[in-house]
Amino acid sequence: MAHDDEHDPKTKRSHYPLDPNSYQILDEIGRGCSAIVYKALCTTTSTVVAIKSIDRSTTGDFDNIRREAKTMSLLSHPNVLKAHCSFTVGPRLWVVMPFMSAGSLQSIMASSFPNGISENCISIILKETLMGLCYLHDQGHLHRDIKAGNILMDSNGSIKLADFGVSASVYETSSRCLNLHEITGTPYWMAPEVIHSYNGYSYKADIWSFGITALELAHGRPPLSHLPFSESLVMKITRGMRFSEYQKEEEKGKKSKLSKYFKEMVGLCLEQDPCRWPTAAKLLKHYFFKNCKATRGGSLVMGSSDGSTQSNHAMSAPNILVIVIEM
Ligand SMILES: Nc1ncnc2c1ncn2[C@@H]1O[C@H](COP(=O)(O)OP(=O)(O)OP(=O)(O)O)[C@@H](O)[C@H]1O
Protein backbone atom coordinates (compact mmCIF):
# COMPACT_ATOMS: atom_id res chain seq x y z
CA MET A 1 0.00 0.00 0.00
CA ALA A 2 1.47 3.33 -1.00
CA HIS A 3 2.36 5.62 1.82
CA ASP A 4 0.86 9.08 1.80
CA ASP A 5 3.12 11.66 3.41
CA GLU A 6 0.49 14.38 3.60
CA HIS A 7 -1.83 12.25 5.67
CA ASP A 8 0.80 10.91 8.01
CA PRO A 9 0.71 12.79 11.33
CA LYS A 10 4.49 12.28 11.60
CA THR A 11 5.07 14.48 8.58
CA LYS A 12 2.71 17.36 9.31
CA ARG A 13 4.20 20.65 8.25
CA SER A 14 4.13 22.18 11.72
CA HIS A 15 6.46 19.42 12.96
CA TYR A 16 9.29 20.58 10.77
CA PRO A 17 11.57 23.10 12.45
CA LEU A 18 12.54 26.33 10.72
CA ASP A 19 16.09 25.89 11.95
CA PRO A 20 18.95 24.56 9.79
CA ASN A 21 20.61 22.97 12.84
CA SER A 22 17.72 20.52 13.04
CA TYR A 23 18.67 19.04 9.66
CA GLN A 24 21.66 16.81 9.08
CA ILE A 25 22.72 16.81 5.41
CA LEU A 26 23.31 13.21 4.28
CA ASP A 27 23.96 13.46 0.57
CA GLU A 28 23.68 15.68 -2.50
CA ILE A 29 20.87 14.39 -4.73
CA GLY A 30 21.27 16.69 -7.69
CA ARG A 31 21.61 20.22 -9.02
CA GLY A 32 19.28 22.31 -11.12
CA CYS A 33 19.82 25.75 -12.68
CA SER A 34 19.95 27.63 -9.39
CA ALA A 35 19.44 25.04 -6.70
CA ILE A 36 21.10 22.10 -5.02
CA VAL A 37 18.88 19.32 -3.68
CA TYR A 38 20.10 17.39 -0.62
CA LYS A 39 18.93 14.28 1.14
CA ALA A 40 18.84 15.16 4.85
CA LEU A 41 17.70 13.84 8.19
CA CYS A 42 15.34 15.98 10.22
CA THR A 43 16.68 15.19 13.68
CA THR A 44 13.60 16.36 15.58
CA THR A 45 11.16 14.17 13.62
CA SER A 46 13.68 11.44 12.66
CA THR A 47 12.42 11.71 9.08
CA VAL A 48 14.48 11.66 5.92
CA VAL A 49 13.64 14.71 3.82
CA ALA A 50 14.84 16.44 0.66
CA ILE A 51 16.06 20.03 0.99
CA LYS A 52 16.15 22.29 -2.03
CA SER A 53 18.73 24.97 -1.31
CA ILE A 54 18.33 27.97 -3.58
CA ASP A 55 20.98 30.66 -3.87
CA ARG A 56 19.37 34.12 -3.76
CA SER A 57 22.32 35.78 -5.42
CA THR A 58 22.17 33.62 -8.56
CA THR A 59 18.41 33.79 -9.01
CA GLY A 60 17.14 36.80 -10.90
CA ASP A 61 13.56 36.52 -9.78
CA PHE A 62 13.62 35.75 -6.09
CA ASP A 63 9.92 36.60 -5.77
CA ASN A 64 9.19 33.76 -8.15
CA ILE A 65 11.18 31.39 -5.96
CA ARG A 66 9.38 32.51 -2.83
CA ARG A 67 6.16 31.93 -4.72
CA GLU A 68 7.38 28.41 -5.50
CA ALA A 69 7.93 27.72 -1.82
CA LYS A 70 4.65 29.31 -0.81
CA THR A 71 2.72 27.43 -3.47
CA MET A 72 4.32 24.14 -2.47
CA SER A 73 3.52 24.53 1.23
CA LEU A 74 -0.14 25.35 0.63
CA LEU A 75 -0.84 22.39 -1.61
CA SER A 76 -2.38 19.20 -0.38
CA HIS A 77 -2.87 16.38 -2.84
CA PRO A 78 -1.36 12.88 -2.85
CA ASN A 79 0.07 13.46 -6.33
CA VAL A 80 1.57 16.89 -5.77
CA LEU A 81 4.87 17.32 -3.93
CA LYS A 82 4.19 19.54 -0.96
CA ALA A 83 6.84 21.55 0.87
CA HIS A 84 6.94 20.82 4.60
CA CYS A 85 8.33 24.31 5.25
CA SER A 86 10.78 26.88 3.91
CA PHE A 87 13.13 29.39 5.54
CA THR A 88 16.25 31.40 4.74
CA VAL A 89 19.73 30.28 5.70
CA GLY A 90 22.15 33.14 5.04
CA PRO A 91 21.96 33.90 1.32
CA ARG A 92 19.97 30.75 0.57
CA LEU A 93 16.34 29.71 0.76
CA TRP A 94 15.81 26.17 2.07
CA VAL A 95 12.69 24.35 0.97
CA VAL A 96 12.13 21.18 3.03
CA MET A 97 10.04 18.52 1.27
CA PRO A 98 9.35 14.78 1.31
CA PHE A 99 12.25 12.72 0.02
CA MET A 100 11.26 10.77 -3.11
CA SER A 101 13.78 7.97 -2.98
CA ALA A 102 13.35 6.50 -6.47
CA GLY A 103 13.98 9.93 -8.04
CA SER A 104 12.47 11.33 -11.20
CA LEU A 105 10.99 9.27 -14.02
CA GLN A 106 13.65 10.81 -16.23
CA SER A 107 16.48 9.46 -14.06
CA ILE A 108 14.75 6.06 -13.74
CA MET A 109 14.52 5.87 -17.54
CA ALA A 110 18.11 7.06 -18.00
CA SER A 111 19.42 4.32 -15.72
CA SER A 112 17.12 1.43 -16.57
CA PHE A 113 14.73 2.13 -19.45
CA PRO A 114 16.58 4.09 -22.15
CA ASN A 115 13.95 3.17 -24.77
CA GLY A 116 10.94 3.97 -22.66
CA ILE A 117 8.70 2.11 -20.25
CA SER A 118 5.76 -0.19 -20.81
CA GLU A 119 2.38 1.25 -21.65
CA ASN A 120 0.82 -0.40 -18.62
CA CYS A 121 3.17 1.50 -16.30
CA ILE A 122 2.85 4.68 -18.34
CA SER A 123 -0.93 4.65 -17.90
CA ILE A 124 -0.60 4.51 -14.11
CA ILE A 125 2.16 7.12 -13.92
CA LEU A 126 0.26 9.47 -16.23
CA LYS A 127 -3.04 8.98 -14.45
CA GLU A 128 -1.47 9.92 -11.13
CA THR A 129 0.30 12.89 -12.74
CA LEU A 130 -2.94 14.01 -14.34
CA MET A 131 -4.79 13.81 -11.02
CA GLY A 132 -2.10 16.08 -9.54
CA LEU A 133 -2.40 18.44 -12.51
CA CYS A 134 -6.20 18.51 -12.23
CA TYR A 135 -5.84 19.52 -8.59
CA LEU A 136 -3.34 22.28 -9.45
CA HIS A 137 -5.61 23.67 -12.17
CA ASP A 138 -8.63 23.50 -9.85
CA GLN A 139 -6.63 25.50 -7.31
CA GLY A 140 -5.84 28.12 -9.95
CA HIS A 141 -2.22 27.16 -10.55
CA LEU A 142 -0.38 26.41 -13.75
CA HIS A 143 2.57 24.08 -13.57
CA ARG A 144 4.40 25.23 -16.73
CA ASP A 145 7.19 22.64 -16.64
CA ILE A 146 5.56 19.21 -16.95
CA LYS A 147 8.16 16.61 -17.98
CA ALA A 148 9.44 13.22 -16.79
CA GLY A 149 12.19 15.04 -14.84
CA ASN A 150 9.50 16.66 -12.69
CA ILE A 151 7.54 13.49 -11.96
CA LEU A 152 9.03 11.94 -8.84
CA MET A 153 8.52 8.49 -7.43
CA ASP A 154 9.22 7.16 -3.97
CA SER A 155 10.28 3.67 -2.97
CA ASN A 156 6.73 2.41 -2.57
CA GLY A 157 5.65 3.59 -5.98
CA SER A 158 3.74 6.76 -5.20
CA ILE A 159 3.96 9.41 -7.87
CA LYS A 160 4.16 13.16 -7.25
CA LEU A 161 4.30 16.10 -9.59
CA ALA A 162 7.15 18.36 -8.49
CA ASP A 163 9.06 21.51 -9.19
CA PHE A 164 7.11 24.67 -9.29
CA GLY A 165 10.21 26.64 -10.20
CA VAL A 166 8.40 28.20 -13.10
CA SER A 167 4.81 27.80 -11.96
CA ALA A 168 2.55 30.80 -11.66
CA SER A 169 -0.54 31.31 -9.59
CA VAL A 170 -3.30 32.57 -11.77
CA TYR A 171 -4.90 34.23 -8.78
CA GLU A 172 -1.79 36.27 -8.13
CA THR A 173 -1.97 37.96 -11.53
CA SER A 174 -3.71 41.30 -11.41
CA SER A 175 -5.99 40.66 -14.36
CA ARG A 176 -6.92 37.17 -13.19
CA CYS A 177 -6.80 36.16 -16.81
CA LEU A 178 -4.87 33.26 -18.18
CA ASN A 179 -2.50 35.18 -20.42
CA LEU A 180 0.88 35.26 -18.79
CA HIS A 181 3.12 36.74 -21.44
CA GLU A 182 6.28 35.04 -20.41
CA ILE A 183 8.18 32.19 -21.92
CA THR A 184 8.96 29.65 -19.24
CA GLY A 185 9.37 25.91 -19.34
CA THR A 186 11.78 23.58 -21.08
CA PRO A 187 11.73 23.96 -24.89
CA TYR A 188 11.18 20.33 -25.98
CA TRP A 189 8.05 20.13 -23.85
CA MET A 190 6.74 23.63 -24.64
CA ALA A 191 3.53 24.19 -26.57
CA PRO A 192 3.84 26.10 -29.88
CA GLU A 193 1.47 28.77 -28.53
CA VAL A 194 3.82 29.33 -25.60
CA ILE A 195 6.78 29.66 -27.96
CA HIS A 196 4.82 32.10 -30.13
CA SER A 197 3.61 33.69 -26.92
CA TYR A 198 0.96 35.67 -28.76
CA ASN A 199 -1.69 33.82 -26.81
CA GLY A 200 0.21 33.64 -23.56
CA TYR A 201 0.27 30.59 -21.36
CA SER A 202 -2.98 28.95 -20.45
CA TYR A 203 -3.95 25.93 -18.40
CA LYS A 204 -4.16 24.01 -21.60
CA ALA A 205 -0.49 24.52 -22.46
CA ASP A 206 0.20 22.17 -19.52
CA ILE A 207 -1.84 19.63 -21.50
CA TRP A 208 0.50 19.94 -24.49
CA SER A 209 3.52 19.33 -22.21
CA PHE A 210 1.64 16.40 -20.67
CA GLY A 211 1.25 14.87 -24.16
CA ILE A 212 4.97 15.39 -24.87
CA THR A 213 5.74 13.75 -21.49
CA ALA A 214 3.61 10.73 -22.49
CA LEU A 215 5.79 10.33 -25.60
CA GLU A 216 8.93 10.85 -23.53
CA LEU A 217 7.89 7.99 -21.22
CA ALA A 218 7.05 5.77 -24.20
CA HIS A 219 10.27 6.38 -26.14
CA GLY A 220 12.77 7.41 -23.46
CA ARG A 221 13.12 10.96 -24.83
CA PRO A 222 10.84 13.78 -25.97
CA PRO A 223 10.14 14.36 -29.68
CA LEU A 224 12.70 16.54 -31.53
CA SER A 225 15.26 16.00 -28.76
CA HIS A 226 17.81 14.95 -31.38
CA LEU A 227 17.83 18.62 -32.44
CA PRO A 228 19.42 21.46 -30.47
CA PHE A 229 16.90 23.53 -28.43
CA SER A 230 16.82 26.41 -30.88
CA GLU A 231 16.17 24.18 -33.91
CA SER A 232 13.43 22.30 -32.13
CA LEU A 233 11.72 25.63 -31.44
CA VAL A 234 11.98 26.72 -35.08
CA MET A 235 10.61 23.36 -36.25
CA LYS A 236 7.62 23.64 -33.96
CA ILE A 237 6.88 27.20 -35.05
CA THR A 238 7.40 26.90 -38.78
CA ARG A 239 6.20 23.40 -39.52
CA GLY A 240 3.90 22.70 -36.65
CA MET A 241 4.39 19.43 -34.86
CA ARG A 242 2.18 16.76 -36.25
CA PHE A 243 1.87 13.92 -33.80
CA SER A 244 0.92 11.44 -36.52
CA GLU A 245 4.07 12.27 -38.54
CA TYR A 246 6.27 11.99 -35.48
CA GLN A 247 4.74 8.65 -34.57
CA LYS A 248 5.21 7.33 -38.13
CA GLU A 249 8.87 8.32 -37.97
CA GLU A 250 9.35 6.65 -34.56
CA GLU A 251 7.73 3.44 -35.69
CA LYS A 252 9.35 3.21 -39.14
CA GLY A 253 9.76 -0.47 -39.96
CA LYS A 254 8.81 -1.56 -36.42
CA LYS A 255 5.62 -3.03 -35.03
CA SER A 256 3.90 -0.33 -32.99
CA LYS A 257 4.24 -0.94 -29.27
CA LEU A 258 1.62 1.65 -28.43
CA SER A 259 -2.12 1.05 -28.27
CA LYS A 260 -4.64 3.06 -30.25
CA TYR A 261 -5.96 4.49 -26.98
CA PHE A 262 -2.51 5.81 -26.05
CA LYS A 263 -2.10 7.37 -29.48
CA GLU A 264 -5.58 8.86 -29.38
CA MET A 265 -5.00 10.37 -25.92
CA VAL A 266 -1.65 11.89 -26.96
CA GLY A 267 -3.17 13.07 -30.25
CA LEU A 268 -5.77 15.07 -28.27
CA CYS A 269 -3.02 16.76 -26.21
CA LEU A 270 -1.04 17.64 -29.33
CA GLU A 271 -3.86 19.00 -31.49
CA GLN A 272 -2.56 21.88 -33.60
CA ASP A 273 -5.46 24.09 -32.62
CA PRO A 274 -5.09 25.00 -28.89
CA CYS A 275 -8.87 25.48 -28.63
CA ARG A 276 -9.23 21.73 -29.10
CA TRP A 277 -6.88 20.73 -26.28
CA PRO A 278 -8.92 19.02 -23.54
CA THR A 279 -8.88 20.18 -19.94
CA ALA A 280 -7.03 17.98 -17.44
CA ALA A 281 -10.37 16.85 -15.96
CA LYS A 282 -11.70 15.88 -19.38
CA LEU A 283 -8.50 14.07 -20.30
CA LEU A 284 -8.71 12.05 -17.09
CA LYS A 285 -11.97 10.58 -18.40
CA HIS A 286 -10.27 9.29 -21.56
CA TYR A 287 -10.55 5.56 -22.17
CA PHE A 288 -6.75 5.21 -21.87
CA PHE A 289 -7.05 5.88 -18.12
CA LYS A 290 -10.29 3.92 -17.61
CA ASN A 291 -8.91 0.55 -16.65
CA CYS A 292 -5.83 1.60 -14.79
CA LYS A 293 -5.98 1.89 -11.05
CA ALA A 294 -4.16 4.53 -9.06
CA THR A 295 -1.30 3.24 -6.90
CA ARG A 296 -3.06 3.94 -3.63
CA GLY A 297 -5.66 1.32 -4.63
CA GLY A 298 -2.97 -1.33 -4.97
CA SER A 299 0.76 -1.17 -4.84
CA LEU A 300 3.44 -0.62 -7.39
CA VAL A 301 5.81 -3.54 -7.16
CA MET A 302 9.19 -3.00 -8.68
CA GLY A 303 11.11 -5.84 -10.20
CA SER A 304 14.87 -5.79 -9.89
CA SER A 305 17.45 -6.66 -12.52
CA ASP A 306 17.85 -10.16 -11.07
CA GLY A 307 14.22 -10.87 -11.93
CA SER A 308 12.95 -10.91 -8.37
CA THR A 309 10.18 -8.59 -7.26
CA GLN A 310 10.09 -6.60 -4.08
CA SER A 311 7.15 -4.73 -2.67
CA ASN A 312 9.03 -1.65 -1.57
CA HIS A 313 11.63 0.26 0.45
CA ALA A 314 14.54 -1.90 -0.65
CA MET A 315 14.62 -0.63 -4.22
CA SER A 316 16.83 2.10 -5.57
CA ALA A 317 16.19 3.64 -8.98
CA PRO A 318 19.13 2.07 -10.86
CA ASN A 319 17.90 -1.41 -9.94
CA ILE A 320 14.44 -0.89 -11.28
CA LEU A 321 14.09 -2.91 -14.43
CA VAL A 322 10.47 -3.82 -14.67
CA ILE A 323 7.52 -2.26 -12.97
CA VAL A 324 4.49 -4.45 -12.62
CA ILE A 325 1.24 -3.44 -11.14
CA GLU A 326 -0.26 -5.65 -8.51
CA MET A 327 -3.97 -5.10 -8.23
N1 LIG B 1 11.90 15.79 -3.14
C1 LIG B 1 12.84 15.19 -3.85
N2 LIG B 1 13.22 13.92 -3.57
C2 LIG B 1 14.18 13.32 -4.30
N3 LIG B 1 14.83 13.89 -5.35
C3 LIG B 1 14.49 15.16 -5.67
C4 LIG B 1 13.50 15.87 -4.94
N4 LIG B 1 13.38 17.11 -5.50
C5 LIG B 1 14.26 17.17 -6.50
N5 LIG B 1 14.93 16.00 -6.63
C6 LIG B 1 15.97 15.70 -7.61
O1 LIG B 1 17.03 16.64 -7.45
C7 LIG B 1 17.59 17.00 -8.71
C8 LIG B 1 17.64 18.51 -8.86
O2 LIG B 1 16.30 19.00 -8.85
P1 LIG B 1 15.91 20.49 -9.24
O3 LIG B 1 14.43 20.60 -9.16
O4 LIG B 1 16.72 21.47 -8.48
O5 LIG B 1 16.45 20.67 -10.68
P2 LIG B 1 16.01 20.10 -12.08
O6 LIG B 1 14.52 19.79 -12.10
O7 LIG B 1 16.93 18.97 -12.43
O8 LIG B 1 16.34 21.31 -13.03
P3 LIG B 1 15.65 22.75 -13.13
O9 LIG B 1 16.63 23.69 -12.55
O10 LIG B 1 15.46 22.90 -14.59
O11 LIG B 1 14.36 22.71 -12.39
C9 LIG B 1 16.74 16.30 -9.77
O12 LIG B 1 17.41 15.13 -10.18
C10 LIG B 1 15.47 15.92 -9.04
O13 LIG B 1 14.90 14.72 -9.56
Image (tube, rainbow, N blue to C red):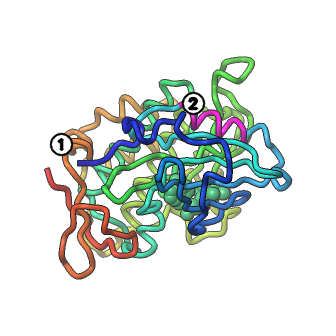
**Residue at position x 38%, y 29% from top?**
281
Looking at the rendered structure, the secondary structure element under dot 1 is: loop
Q: Position of residue 29 (x, y in %)?
A: 57, 66
Q: CA distance from mark 1 to mark 2?
A: 28 Å
Mark sitting earlier along the chain (1/2): 2
Q: Type of residue at label 1? A: Asn
Residue 305 shown left or right of residue 106 in the figure: left
Quick check: is the Cβ at mark 2 less than 8 Å away from ligand 1? no
Name the residue beneath numbered marker 1. 291
Q: Which residues are magenta?
A: 65-74
Magenta stretch, main secondary structure, is: helix
- Closer to the camera in the image, 300 or 91: 91
Task: Return the residue nearer the eye: 169 or 191.
Answer: 169
The dot on residue 175 is none
**Foreground label between 1 and 2:** 2
Q: Are marks 1 and 2 in contact (CB under 8 Å)?
A: no
Q: Is residue 207 magenta?
A: no
Q: Which residue is mark 2?
A: 141
